[in-house]
Every structure is written in structure tokens, then in C-alpha cells.
Image (cartoon, rainbow, N blue to C red):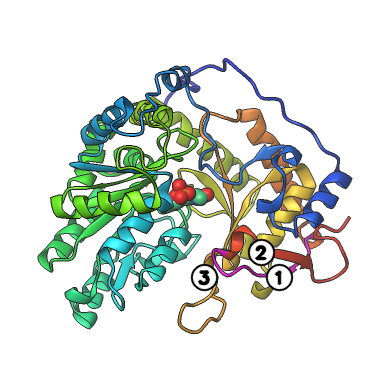
Amino acid sequence: MSRRAWAEPWKIKMVEHLRMTTPEERRRAIAEAGYNPFLLPSRLVYIDLLTDSGTSAMSDVQWAGLMRGDEAYAGSENYYRLERAVREHYGYKHLIPTHQGRGAEHLLSQLCIREGQVVPGNMYFTTTKLHQELAGGKFVDVIVDEAHDPENEHPFKGNVDLAKMQKLIDDVGPERIAYLSLETNVNMAGGQPCSLENIRATCALCRAHGVPVFLDATRALENCYFIQQREPGYRDKTLSQILREICDQTDGCTFSAKKDALVNIGGFLAINDDTLATRARNLVVVYEGLHTYGGMAGRDMEALAIGIEESVSWAHQHARIGQVEYLGRKLLEAGVPIVRPIGSHGVFLNAAAFLPHVPRDQFPAQSLAAALYVDSGVRGMERGAVSAGRSKETSQSLYPELELVRLTIPRRVYTQAHMDVVIESVAELHRHRERVVGLQMTYEPEFLRFFQARFEPVTGDRVLRD
Ligand code: F0G
């Protein structure tokens, strides 16, 4: 433990006013939103912990960079700057920009998955898995069992289970495996990292069988911070060095720039293989834009290049993850069940344990997220059965072991006092948890249902009783 208190390595230059709402306004708003926080207008949200995606505060240097946007259709100066930043920090040879992460997932899936192939991954992510399925693939989970247990304190719950991966190779044969989709700092597990030892062993196993490995590097730097803190031998390495060690094991990555890289929009596919890069550059013009902008404005690419430089700072990650730890530790002290260890990008409430009186088919996490909004205007996100959707084969609803509400912390946006408001509200709801009522789904969209599904309380008209 360090002897002195620490604080963020920045100060606030500009503020954005928040609107306070009354409980009555919030009750009305959540009912109109079909009890789905995604359908709330943000002006009715006080503290917005829906996502850390695209919600970061950019630095003055990034804002200044916007003015240097070279808005040329082809060969923008900012593209070359971004290419240099990606090569230096991520190390991949070819950069194919996209409008955001799922654009890169779409390209990779279309390029590398053949009908009937399987795509193993260390837990699913919603958009990633959907693009794999739309390309004819089948996702197979190969994460360690500990990841599915919210109480388990394993320091690297994002690790691939090598025995599961080996068994898959033996069972289906390496030629039926499109690639391993390896996510750093696994979002759906609660922001849990992989160790470099595991990444190395996993990639060696895949290499030995000719199975490519593509990284989802969306929160790779947060993973690097955990490696630096927790894994023997990395204390004196920079985050940038650790990042290169991870990326160098793999064949390429998809990347949502809206998280680690501190910008509001953007993403890319980065790969080493020349032939695959040529195919990707051909496909990107169909769906995203020319291969030197891929859906981003020149100024977006400039802000992203600067954001990458800022995101490799240890002091930045220490403060970012430190704030998440502050929230998590206080909730643990208040006896609130959360996923442990505390993750990097948010605190995940264990809704199944929080609301034992709400059965799984009444969506405890969705109910808890709606009730939290009514209580204090704090917006979180369901990460449980609604997010998991239905089985591609049987169309039955999937019930993953983790039924969570994610309180996701935007980077450089909220203060510790905001965290205290969240803590009070969650702790109060937990003390009076019997007030929370389960939900039934009244509208289910075909794809990624959590974004637009609608619900109503199973009894009466209130998700949070008085
Ligand atoms: N991969 C991971 C691990 C993600 O968390 C996300 C997005 C994506 C890919 C897709 O990127 O949104 O830029 O298209 N996660 C957001 C979230 C939506 O709230 O967790 P995108």
C-alpha cells in the first residue's frame, strides 16, 4: 500500500451540466422506455454508467488534434499518423480503419470464417458472436471455469482453458476451427484479464495446430495494467512493452477505439498477413469506406492516434482502474454482491444474488438496472440472460451463469463524489431489495435483443415498490 493518497493525472477544464430529475419523472421515463435503460433519453439520466464505450472525456490535446483533421477522401495525413501509432504500440503491419469495433468484427468474420466452422473464444461478446454466426460460424466457449463464478478470486479469470482448447482441436480437427477469438480483459466476465503466461501458452498451442489467433484488443491496455500489477516479472515493464508482448503472439486484432483509446467513435482491424490485408482492404470499401478512413473522419483518426499515445500511460490506467476499484471496494464493504476480483472498466452487480426472490426468467439484472434508475437516476446495463439472447440452433433463450448489472465507468468523466452517490443508491437498494419486482419481455427484436427489447413488471405497474 502506498502511504499517500493519489489522484487523477489531469484537471478539469470544461464541464457539462447535468439535469436532476424527480423520482416521479424517472418512474414515468423508465415505463416509457419499456424498462430498458438503452431506451432512456440521456437528458433524463443523472450519472450514466451504461457503458464506457465512446463516453470518455478527450484531453485538450485530442481536441486540438480535431482541428488538424485532413478531410481528404483518400490518403488523409491523419490515416498515416494513426498507422504509425498502431504499428508502434500494437505492432501489427496493416491497419484497416473501421467506423467502430463491430465494423472490424464484420470484416474479420466475413474474411476468415467458412460455413460450418467453429470459432472458439474466451467467453462471448454480443456483437462479436453475432458476426461470427452471421458468417456461418459457431461460437464455442473455452474460457476457464472460474470466469463463470462471480465469487471466485482468480487473478486472471479471462484465461483460456488450454484443456478445453485442446479438446476442441481433437474433437473437430484444426481445419474446422476458423481462428481463436481471444479477448483481453474479458468484458462479459466482469472486465477480467488474461495473464501473459496464458496468452503465450494458448497461442503456442494454436500455432502448433495451424489455428490463427485474432485478438479483441478493445481493452488490451487495461489488461496490461493488471499484468503489470499481478503477474510476476512485469513490475518494471511499461504498459506499451506488455502490449507488444501480447500482440506479437497473435495474427491480428479487432479494436473498438471507443474504450481504451479515449475517443467517442472509431475502430480498426489490424493484421500481419499481406494477402489477408489485401482482401480486407477490398472488403472495407464495401461496408465502411475507403481503406484510408473506413468510416472515420480525418479528425477522428487524429484524436484516435493521440488517444492511443495517452492510453499507454501507466498513471492514466492507474487512476482509471483506481476509480473502478474505489467503487467496487465500497460496495463490498456495504455487503453488496459484486463480481470479484473488481474488474477494470466497471463494477458488475451479481443480480442473481442481489435479488434472490426474482426468478431467472423474470430477468433479475434487467429489473435491478431499471430499479436503480428509478432510485437515483443512475443508468447501468443488463449483462445476463437478455444480453445472451437465444441459441442459434434451438432458438431457446440462453441463461448464462452470470446474471449481472454492469456499472461501467466512462474514462475521465465522473468524480469520486459521483461514485459516492452510486454507492449510496446501490447499498440502499440492496438493504431493501424485496422492493424490486421482476419483469416480463413484451417485445423482442431479432438481433442483439438487449438494445431494444421492452418489458413490463410482472405484478402491478412498478419495478420498484415504495
Ligand atoms: N469487443 C468488445 C470486448 C466490446 O466491449 C465491444 C463493445 C465491442 C467489441 C464492439 O465494439 O461497440 O465499437 O462496435 N462494447 C460496448 C460495451 C458496446 O458497452 O461494452 P463497438
- The answer to whether 24 appears left or right of 50 in the picture is right
Could you tell which of marks 1 and 3 lies nearer the N-terminus? 3
User: In terms of secondary structure, what is the magenta stretch mainly?
Assistant: loop
Residue at which label 1 appears: 441
Residue sitting farthest toward the left:
208
Name the residue nearer the viewer: 290 or 191.
290
Relative height, residue 78 to residue 360 (above, below): above
Residue at which label 2 appears: 453
Q: Position of residue 346 (x, y in %)?
A: 53, 45
- Write the start and end of the magenta stretch as one range: 436-448
Secondary-structure class at tag 2:
loop
Callout 1–callout 2 Cβ contact below 8 Å: yes
Confirm or reject: label 3 Cβ below 8 Å from ligand 1: no
Tell me the kind of residue under disc 3.
Pro
- The answer to whether 133 appears left or right of 375 in the picture is left
For the residues labelled 1 and 2, the Cα–Cα distance comes to 7 Å
